[in-house]
Image (spheres, rainbow, N blue to C red):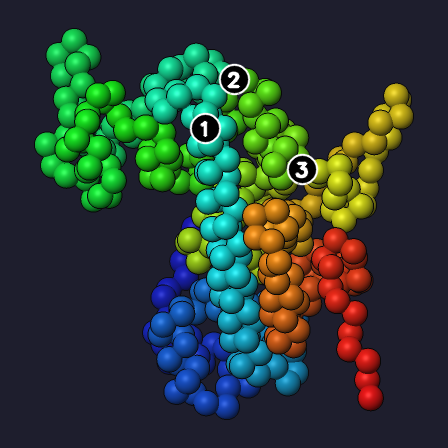
Amino acid sequence: MKFTKLALDLPGQLKRLTDRGLIVPDAATAQGCLTHLGYYRLSAYALPFQDKTQAGKPFKPGTVFQQVLDLYRFDRELRLLVIDAIERVEISVRSQIVNTLCMTHGAHWFLDAAHFQPKFDHGMFLRKIEDDFGVKTGPGGAKILPTRPHSEAFIAHYYQKYGDPYLPPFWMVAETLTLGSLSKLYEGLRDNVTRNAIAGVYGLNEAVLVSWLRSLTYLRNLCAHHSRLWNRDFAIKPLVAHKLGTLLAPFPKTLADGRTIQVQPPSRFYALAVVLFDFLKVVSIGTIWNERLAALLASHAFVDPMAMGFPANWKTEAFWKFPPPAPTV
């Protein structure tokens, strides 16, 4: 079937919304939102207020433009809250990888492919670093050091003062790696003892940490591209850690040997909220991220937490450590 829809101008977009029954008390404000947010982006937040069983998906009686906008604002504030948490986790994981590997194998351990599994593309990993730092490969594979100072002062200082080895120590290199690159590097490490030592800092095993870093990389990229977190089924789902099984996996499967595994990892935001808060309990002692999350949900009346995977009684779970309410007078 060929796509034949035509683009609508701003007045046409607003008319389509009102024709479908959306109440727009302030047309100028609504048109400003359509101008700067976009009709298509806002339309995703209109879905809960529409009757999808009828042709044209009319809005339910009494639906006001502000309700749609409030849902959009909630999602934006949620992304900011998530990014704040991911930043803390990313910095901590980077620090653990740096400290563990450099103390065990030296400052330039990453130059030796023997530290990585065969499936890890060590050559591509180094080429990406070389490209970022301005290192060229000359005849016979000789490395030509950068001629221009790097934008990061500590990288520029390394080449001004040293230059041998041809790449800086890993504690410098790691500061330039993205969360995705750190995740792949950790997953590619050959030594399971090292991987488990790093994961153990967070009370996890290495398989769960690999999964969680993949999930947070995906989540971080969604936030960076301003993609929707509300009402999304997340394509990359975190493995369920044993200590969080009751929080995240209501559908266990018992194997013949009596072991229990989780066969349906959750795909809604709640699972990632649990992962983030579990990390934050370790990396940010005294965090009130849980309270900020609860306050955000409470401040937007049109958000249904259960639609995001939150259990009805989530705030009473010991994991979230909510203080008891103050007694009423």
Q: Residues within 10 Å of mark 2 (few under 14, many from 20)?
A: some
Rendered location of residue 10, percent (x, y): 36, 76
Q: Evaluate if marks 2 and 3 touch, with contact meaning CB atoms under 8 Å apart.
A: no
Give the spatial CA distance, label 1 vs label 3: 20 Å
> Is residue 222 visible to the viewer in this orientation of the structure?
no
* Type of the residue with mark 2: Arg
Neighbor class of circle 3 (other Cα within 10 Å; few <14, some 14-19, many 20+) is: some
Indicate the secondary structure of the residue bearing disc 1: helix
Q: Please tell me the numbered disc located at residue 190.
A: 2
Marks 1 and 2 sit apart, C-alpha to C-alpha, by 10 Å
**1 vs 3, front mark:** 3
In the image, which disc is placed on residue 185?
1
Q: Residue furthest bottom?
A: 25
63 and 230: which one is in front? 230
At label 1, which amino acid type do we have? Leu
Q: CA distance from mark 2 to mark 3?
A: 21 Å
Task: Return the residue at label 3.
Answer: 203
Q: Which numbered dot is residue 156?
A: none
In the rendered structure, which disc, 1 or 2, sits on the residue that comes first in sequence? Answer: 1
Q: Left or right: where does residue 29 sit relative to residue 136?
A: right
Please say if 291 is above or below 61.
above
Residue 235 percent across, percent down from the top left? 58, 43
Depicted 100 relative to depicted 316: above or below: above
Q: Residue at x 50, y 28 (%)?
A: 100
